[in-house]
Amino acid sequence: MGVKLCVCMPTCNRSVCIARILKEELELLSRTGIDIYIYDSSSDDSTKVLVSDYQSKGYQNLYYKYIDYTVHANKKAYLIFKAAESTGYDYIWMIHDHTYCNDEKGLHYILQALEKGCDFYLLNMQSKDFHMTEIKELDEFLLLGAWPLNSFGASILKIDSFIRGTDWREMSKKYLKKKTLNYAHVGFYFERAAQIADIKICRLELPREYFLDFLRYEKTSWDRGTIRICTECWGSNILGLPDIYKKKYEALKTQDKWFLSKYKLIFYKKSGQFTVKSFMRYRKWFRLMSPETYLQNFLIAILPFRTSKYIFCHKLVKRIKKARRENQNIFIYGAGRHAVECADLLNNIGLDFDAFIVTSTEGNPETLAGRPVVAAEAALKKGAALIIIAVLTSGVHEVEKYIGQLNGKSGPGDCIIFE
């Protein structure tokens, strides 16, 4: 009969997103025998009506569940996992309401991988090709998965072995606290993995063109609380894991460096979120995980915004002005949230750029922040360029490698990393 997989999608006031998901993916899920549950916390009935409309068209693989809007997203995740215990599915895949598979081959590969019967699948949907490897050590799992698992869509769990048997009361008591709540699902993954004897964990890599995240260029929903969440919440969650994990301090540093980078802190300095008070409150965590020096963070906190901006952006400014004097094009590599914030910073310090460039324009917007989004290969043929790489830290090396390959057959590109 094959593996029975259910996709669970938490959502709140995003009926437009759910409409796109159902339009693009529901038929594909139906053909591959995968059910999808919409867990809705919206303040109106638009999502419920939308789901009912599709159900009336005969889609028997679509289900609707309501969870009160006051329930925090990570508490909601625990409720969804707990509810899976009483179902007849083999695996559960909880995923964001703005990511869908656009090719049936991707889903067939996942189902084929699930036939291996692993307890936990760590997904990377930004790879170059299909690949599956076994993760044999818990510390290896921690270092590879700690930050990626922040994303709801990065795991597929075997219900019989990983979900059933969980002590939800103790798990909630430990991780659904104020200091750990924002990463409570991450805490659950590693806590539970440590409890299972002879656990089988696999890393599943899937080509990026098979999965589209159409809100990846928007701010995080907890943008106003970034400093607290990325220091205290992240740190408390990781350091609170069982002692069987010996590399917790290394895992702290796997968090994307962008969130505590000098540029990001300067943004928060301007908005009043990063102050001497907030620095002092979270200084322990800055010491443990910040990509910047302790002194640098302290100076950004105490100095006026304009002074901080001048001191810590002058190298970037100097490179861009030099490129302009040499009649080079200025490109921002990326079309996600980091790229947009890079564009905002350049605007703040009075500098311009020509376009956003990406590996492929497929799945990307035509314009972003008032500038075109174009293929890197075509853009670099126009001549010498300065390329500001503004992507997730984990993707920087791959971008540098790709640009290096293009330099052999296109125009020269000088790179600077926006971090």
Image: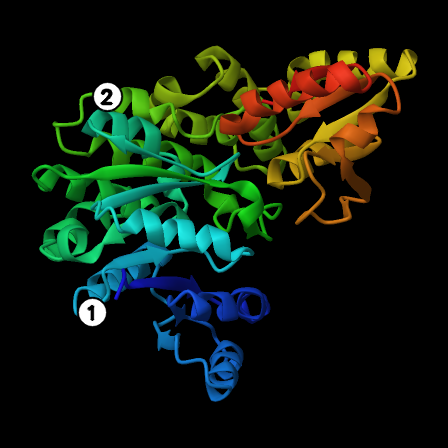
Q: CA distance from mark 2 to mark 1?
A: 36 Å
- Amino acid at pointer 2: Lys
- Check the picture and name the quadrant holding the N terminus: bottom left
In the figure, is residue 331 to the left or right of 96? Answer: right
Q: Nearer the viewer, residue 143 or 223?
A: 143
Name the element at disc 2: loop
In the figure, is residue 59 to the left or right of 363? Answer: left
Going 34% across and 72% down the picture, which residue do you hit? 67
Classed neighbour count for the residue bearing mark 1: other residues with Cα under 10 Å, few (<14), some (14–19), many (≥20): few
- Check the picture and name the quadrant holding the C terminus: top right
* Quadrant housing residue 183: top left
- Amino acid at pointer 1: Gly
* Quadrant housing residue 89: bottom left
**Residue 344 location, x and y as percent?**
72, 36
Q: Nearer the viewer, residue 148 or 116?
A: 116
Q: Nearer the viewer, residue 408 or 349?
A: 408
Q: Which residue is mark 2?
A: 247
**Looking at the image, is mark 2 or mark 1 earlier in the sequence?**
1
